[in-house]
Amino acid sequence: MKHVFIINPAAGKADSTDMIVHQLLKIEDLDYQVYVTRVPGDATEYIKTTCSENPDVQYRFYACGGDGTINEVANGVIGFSNAQMTAYPVGSGNDYVKYFGGKDRFMDLTKLVDGEEVMVDVLKVGDRYALNAVHFGFDTVVLKTMIDVKRKPVIGGKNAYYTGVIKGLFSGLNNKCLIKADGKPVNDGSYMLCTVCNGTHVGGSFNCAPRSLIDDGLAEVCCFSVVPRLKIPFLIGKYMKGTHLDDEKCQKYITYTRARVVELEAPEVMEISVDGELVAGQHFVIEDLEKAIRFVIPKQ
């Protein structure tokens, strides 16, 4: 097995390259190499080229960054029988690994190198793939704001999501799109936000899909209708804790289901978040591909 560490120097608050290389030097007899990304999409193309040119070599690619880096690595390894992946989460959000116990569990490189493989579902959106979530509406406003402020003091870093939420309260509460889950309407054309998840978290600390199973071939679909502004703080608190699906006071605003295929039809161009990457369009088909990627979790 060849271990390839894909490092995104722009992830997190500071470039983690030196720290990761220092940790690798401590592991004996590890056949590894380091690839530092240069531009968005670089990791995906590098992985595809590496796997296709060396079909007899088994690779494990480590996404060293945040959810965006994990997404790029996933888009590279999918479809290659000689590739598996994992994450060394040094980004600002690190939502995907929360399903497996969180960031701290993945930060021991020795246990990660000795980890075990599990098969995980993938969300297909056109020619793109997402491991964690596709979400849109209020969340898109939040994400765009997070991208703008993530490295700014006070309002950035771990507070970037809350900054985005504040902006969303003024410009992201009433959105237009018809959402169907396995052909059945989820809403009437209006909504506040919607998440389509395999993972459990978005935004760094919001447990949007607490019932999610990462290998069942079904995405968790949770759609909020348009919510009065004064009710938002109450709902966000439940949404953060992951209790919104069981709280009776939330039920009048939520439609929740599971589906293999989710279709979106918007009256005008909208943006959706695909594992934190913004994609624009009017019509989207989100398909859950069961156990499509080999993902390695740290040894217990």
Image (cartoon, helix red, strand yellow):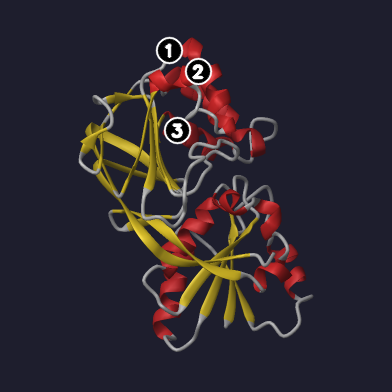
| Towards the viewer: 36 or 263 | 263
How many numbered discs sit on the rendered protein?
Answer: 3
Q: Amino acid at mark 1?
A: Pro
Q: Spatial distance from mark 3 to mark 2, Cα to Cα?
A: 13 Å
At x 20%, y 41%, the residue is 183
Residue 82 visible at all: yes
Q: Dot 2: few (<14), some (14–19), or many (≥20) neighbours within 10 Å?
A: few
Tell me which label, 3 or 1, sits earlier in the chain: 3
Q: Amino acid at mark 3?
A: Asp
Residue 228: which numbered mark, if any? 1
The picture places residue 270, in percent across and down from the top left corner, at 30, 35
Tell me which label, 3 or 2, sits earlier in the chain: 3
Determine the secondary structure under disc 1: loop
Q: Which residue is mark 3?
A: 139
Residue 72: which numbered mark, if any? none
Name, please, the residue furthest toward the right: 26
Q: Which residue is mark 2?
A: 232
The picture places residue 57, in percent across and down from the top left corner, at 49, 86
Q: Spatial distance from mark 3 to mark 1, Cα to Cα?
A: 16 Å
Q: Dot 1: few (<14), some (14–19), or many (≥20) neighbours within 10 Å?
A: few
**53 displayed left or right of 201:** left
At x 44%, y 69%, the residue is 77
Q: Amino acid at mark 2?
A: Ile
At x 48%, y 64%, the residue is 73
Q: Which-is-in-front pick, marks 3 and 1?
A: 1
**209 displayed left or right of 298:** left
